[in-house]
Image (tube, grey):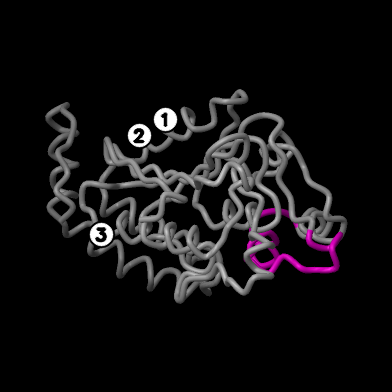
Amino acid sequence: MSDEVLTEAGGGVLLITLNRPQARNAVNASVARGVADALDRLDADDDLQVGILTGAGKGFCSGMDLKAFVAGERPHVEGRGFAGLVQRGPRKPLIAAIEGFAVAGGFEVALGCDLIVAARGARLGIPEAKRGLIAAGGALIRLPKRIPYHLAMELALTGDPIDAERAHAIGLVNRLADPGEALAAARELAAAVAANGPLAIAASKQILSAAVDWSDAQAWEGQAELAEQVFDSEDAREGATAFAEKRDPVWKGR
């Protein structure tokens, strides 16, 4: 693991930190590979239930490292895409914890996460049009599925950022935090997720992620297949038993 991406595990949570504060946590090939490796670890470790992705220093991520790009680097990982994330994220939930800014590809990295916590006053946006470019890291695909069409158009065509408060009001941000407290708020959210049944968490994420592209018939069929696996599991029986016995469940992930 490169020191440009740091990881720390504890309490069922894997903290992944983009560690290039001197470069506004811009994504180069090393960062992309580091993120991809961290997500592989998140999915492979049965002791981990949820991940948090954050940035060192004053901001989350400023997008692609343009100097590295000009030098010939391509910050993509086969199968996962830009930043080792935007095309295919982890099977387990991933929370973005944003301080300061998440712009250009950095905003697209955040959109590749399942939940977003942002500090008040943080700037989010896709300014690519101001440079004659387009946001090709997923924003143009994901935004119209998550916010109204005209708002997505405004973000893409003007390139102007919005603050975290506005992003929260339109549904892009789950929780707001005071400046400097985004990671703490993300840890609180992660703990609430990690306390639940791991099979139920994974299946719920899979269904929600796919449902926007499923027809009604596909949705019911796909949900039934995944739900059957969950309802037939030891964890499902443990959850019901623990509820009846008024105690915390002990999950086994099977």
Is 213 in front, or is 76?
76
Q: Amino acid at mark 3?
A: Ala
- Residue 22 coordinates in the image, percent (x, y): 61, 43
- Residue 7 coordinates in the image, percent (x, y): 36, 45
**Mark 3 to mark 2 CA distance (whole Å):** 19 Å
Is 121 located above or below residue 199 in the figure?
Answer: above
Crowding at label 1, few (<14), some or many (≥20) Cα neighbours within 10 Å?
A: few
**Mark 1 to mark 3 CA distance (whole Å):** 23 Å
Is 82 located above or below residue 26 in the figure?
Answer: below
**Mark 1 to mark 2 CA distance (whole Å):** 5 Å
Is 43 in front, or is 153?
43
Crowding at label 2, few (<14), some or many (≥20) Cα neighbours within 10 Å?
A: some
Quadrant of the image containing the C terminus: bottom left
Q: Is residue 218 visible?
A: no
Q: For the residue labelled by badge 2, is the local secondary structure a helix, a strand or a loop?
A: helix
- Residue 168 coordinates in the image, percent (x, y): 66, 38
Q: Nearer the viewer, mark 3 or mark 2?
A: 3
Q: Which residues are magenta?
A: 128-148
Q: Are marks 1 and 3 in contact (CB under 8 Å)?
A: no
Q: Are marks 1 and 2 in contact (CB under 8 Å)?
A: yes
Q: Which residue is mark 2?
A: 191
Q: For the residue labelled by badge 3, is the local secondary structure a helix, a strand or a loop?
A: helix
Q: Which comes before the other along the chain, label 3 or label 2? A: 3
Q: Which residue is mark 3?
A: 44
Is 91 located above or below residue 238 in the figure?
Answer: below
Q: Amino acid at mark 1?
A: Glu
Residue 161 marker? none
Q: Which residue is mark 1?
A: 188
Q: Amino acid at mark 2?
A: Ala
Q: Which comes before the other along the chain, label 1 or label 3? A: 3
